[in-house]
Amino acid sequence: MADITLEHITKRYGDGYEAVKDLNLEIADGEFMILVGPSGCGKSTALRMVAGLEDISDGQLKIGGELVNDRAPKDRDIAMVFQNYALYPHMTVRENMGFALKLAKTPQAEIDRKVNEVAQVLDLEQHLERKPANLSGGQRQRVAMGRAIVRDPKAFLMDEPLSNLDAKLRVQMRTEISRLQQQLGTTMIYVTHDQTEALTLGDRIAVMRSGVLQQVGSPGELYANPTNLFVAGFVGSPSMNFLPGELADGVVKLPIGDVRLSDEARQDLEGGGGPAKGRQVIAGMRPEHFEDSGLVHDPPSGVKFPVTIDVLESMGSEYYAYFNVESGRVASQELDELAQDSGVGEIPHAGSRTQVVARLDAASTVKQGEPGELWYDSSRLQLFDPESGRSLLTHSKVD
Amino acid sequence: MKRSPREITGWSAAIAIVVIASLIPIVWIISLSFKDPSTIADGSFLPTKWTWTNYSGIFKQSLFTDALRNSIGIALIATLISVVLACFAAYAIARLDFPGKRLILVFALAIAMFPPISIVGPLYNMWRNIGLYDTWPGLIIPYMTFALPLAIFTLSAFFREIPWELEQAAQVDGATPFQAFFKVIAPLAAPGVFTTAILVFLFCWNDFVFAVSLTSTSKAETVPAAIASFPGASQFTAPIGSIAAAAVVVTIPIIVIVLLFQRRIVAGLTAGAVKG
Ligand SMILES: Nc1ncnc2c1ncn2[C@@H]1O[C@H](COP(=O)(O)OP(=O)(O)OP(=O)(O)O)[C@@H](O)[C@H]1O
Ligand SMILES: [Mg+2]
C-alpha cells in the first residue's frame, strides 16, 4: 500500500518518439485511478514506466515517497495485468497464478489456498489444471487478472483487464474489482477504453491525449466541467454534441435557437475577458440534457425548439433521437482527433448539417420522420473556445 | 475448406510416389546389408540368403568401432560447444539493438554457405604444421566453423518468436533476471535449442570431406571416412555388404533422435502466451 507520484514524467522511445510528455499525477494511497484516452496516447507506456518495464527518460517516479526511477520491477512490489496477458504458456493456470507467490517463497498450502480463492472469484476453478493455449480469450484474460490479484502488492496496475470479456462477465468482473479494491485498499492504476468502467470504477479519472495529460478529476467533475473539447467529447456516452455558436447579449445564438446564458456562465465569460459580444464559440450539449418538450412541465430554464427526428432508436428505458441542424462546420483539431478514435461516438463532420443526438425518456411521444418539439436544459450548456479548445466556463454544476 | 475426393486421390498418389522414390535407396541399402557375400551381386531387390554376418563383421573390426567412437565423440562435442555459444549470440541478436546486428547474421549465413572443400587444402597444411592433423580438435574446429553460423541463424529465428513480455511479466511477479530466464524463457527456448542441436549434430555426423582429408588413422577417423577405407574380405572382393551394414548402423541413431524429439520440435510451445 503506497501512494504513487509522477513528477514531470517523460518517455522518449529509441526512435525519438515522445509517447508521454511531462506527466504530473499524484495517486493517493488506496486510490482507484483510471487512465483513459484514445489508442496510442501513451497509457500503456505510462503504466509500464510505473512498473519499471520502461526506462523513464525524464522526471521522477515515487512510490510510497521513495524515488524508484532506477529500481528493478521486482523491487517495486507492484502487480500488473498486461494488455496482451503475457501468460506463461508452459505452466498451468494454477502455476501461472501461483508463480509470484512461489517466487516469494510462500508456503505451498498458503499458495493453494489463495489461488483457489481467486479462481473462485474469477470463475476459473474448473480450468486450474489447464494450459493457457487451451483457454478462450476471456478465460486467458481472467488468468492474467488472477495472477495479479493473488498477490498483496503496494499497487495494482491493470492495462485494459476486461477488454476481452463478454458484456455479462465484464459487469460481473467490474463489480468484483471494485469490491476487491475497496476490501484490500490497494492503490490502483487502471487503463480502460470503456466509458462505463471509467465512470463507475474510478475515484478519479485521468484523460490523456497524444502523451499529454488533459484533465484529472472525479468522474462527476470530468462529466460536468470538462476543461477542453477533447475531454468533453471523450467522457460520456453517447458523446457530447458540438454546435457552432455566437455570443450575443446574454444569450448564445445556436442553430437550434437562442439559448439564454446562466448567471454563472455570464460571470465566467466576463471574467475571462475578451469581447463577449459577437464572439464565436463552440457549444457543447450532452444528449441527456435534451428532453421531449411534452414531458417537461414548468421548466426551470431552457429552450424549446422544433425538430424533425431522422432516426429514433429505442434502448428500452430510453430513446436516442438523431436529428440534423443547419450549421457551419465545427472545426477543431481536437474534435478531428476524437473522431479518429473510433472508440468514441459520433462527432459532427464537415458540411453544412450537423447531427445531434438527444436522449429522451421512454415516455416520449416523438416519432421518427415526423416533426416534434424538444427541450434543452440551458443551465447545462458548455462553451468552448474554437481556437484553443479550452472551456470558457469554470464552475458548472457537479452532479 | 473441404477437398474433393478427386483432389484427395491426386494428392495421395503424388505423396506416395515421393515417399516411395525416397525410400527405395534406403530399403535397398538395408537389403544389401542383409545379403550373404556370395549373393551380393545377384541383382534381386530382397536378399535371397539372409545373414547377420555383415553386421557382426563390422563390429569385430576395430576400424569400424574406433570410427564409431570418434564419430560420436567429435559430433557431440562440436554440437555442445556450438549450441552453447550460439545461444549467447542468438540471445543478443534477438534481444538487443546494436549496430552491425544484421551484418553478423549476413556473415553467419555467408559462412554457412561456404563450400567446405575450398578450405580443406589450407587446413590440411596448417593442421600438419601445428599438430592438429588426425586429432579430435582437428575436426571439431572446422565443424564449429560451419555449425556455429548455422546454429546462430536458426536459434535467433527461434528466439525472435519468444514473447519477451513474459520475461517482464516474471520480473513484475518478483523474479530476478536469472529466475526470469531459467523459469520462463529457458523452457520456451528448449524446442528451438533441441532443433538446432539436431541440425548441427547431423551436419557433423554426416561430414565426409573434412573427415577424409584431415584424419588418417583410427585416432580420429569418423565413420563416413572409415567406411570408404573398408577392406574387402579378400583383396578381390568388394566390401559392399560391410559398407551397407555400416551405413545402416550410422543412420539409425539419427532416425531415433529425430523421432524422439520430433514432437517437441513441432509443438508450438509458446501458444497461448499473448493475445492475438
Ligand atoms: N517500443 C516503442 N518504440 C517506439 N514507439 C513506441 C514503442 N512502444 C510504443 N510506442 C509509441 O508510443 C505511443 C503510445 O503507445 P502506448 O502503447 O502507450 O499506447 P496506449 O495508449 O496504451 O494505446 P492502446 O489503447 O492502443 O493500448 C504509440 O504512438 C506508439 O506508437
Ligand atoms: Mg495500451
Image (cartoon, coloured by chain):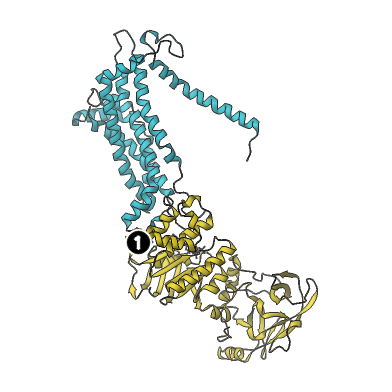
Residue B242 placed where, x, y %?
Answer: 33, 16
Instruction: Work out whether residue B244 or residue A207 is closer to the camera in this orientation and state it.
Output: B244
The answer to whether residue A259 is above or below residue B183 is below
Instruction: Work out whether residue B35 or residue A43 is closer to the camera in this orientation and state it.
Output: B35
- Residue pictured at 37% horizontal, 48% vertical: B187
The answer to whether residue A369 is above or below residue A135 is below
Chain B on-screen colour: cyan
- Residue pictured at 39% horizontal, 31% vertical: B256
Residue A194, by quadrant, is bottom right
Crowdedness of circle 1 by 10 Å Cα count: few (<14), some, many (20+)? many
Chain letter for the yellow part:
A
Residue at the disc numbered 1: B174
**In what quadrant of the picture does the C terminus of chain A appear?**
bottom right
- Residue pictured at 44% horizontal, 18% vertical: B28
Tell me, yes or no, if residue A123 can be seen here: yes
Residue B229 placed where, x, y %?
Answer: 29, 18
Q: Specify whether B76 is left or right of A194.
A: left
Chain letter for the residue marked with disc 1 in the picture: B
The answer to whether residue B50 is above or below residue A310 is above
Q: Which amino acid lies under the numbered mark 1 shown in the image of this protein?
A: Gly
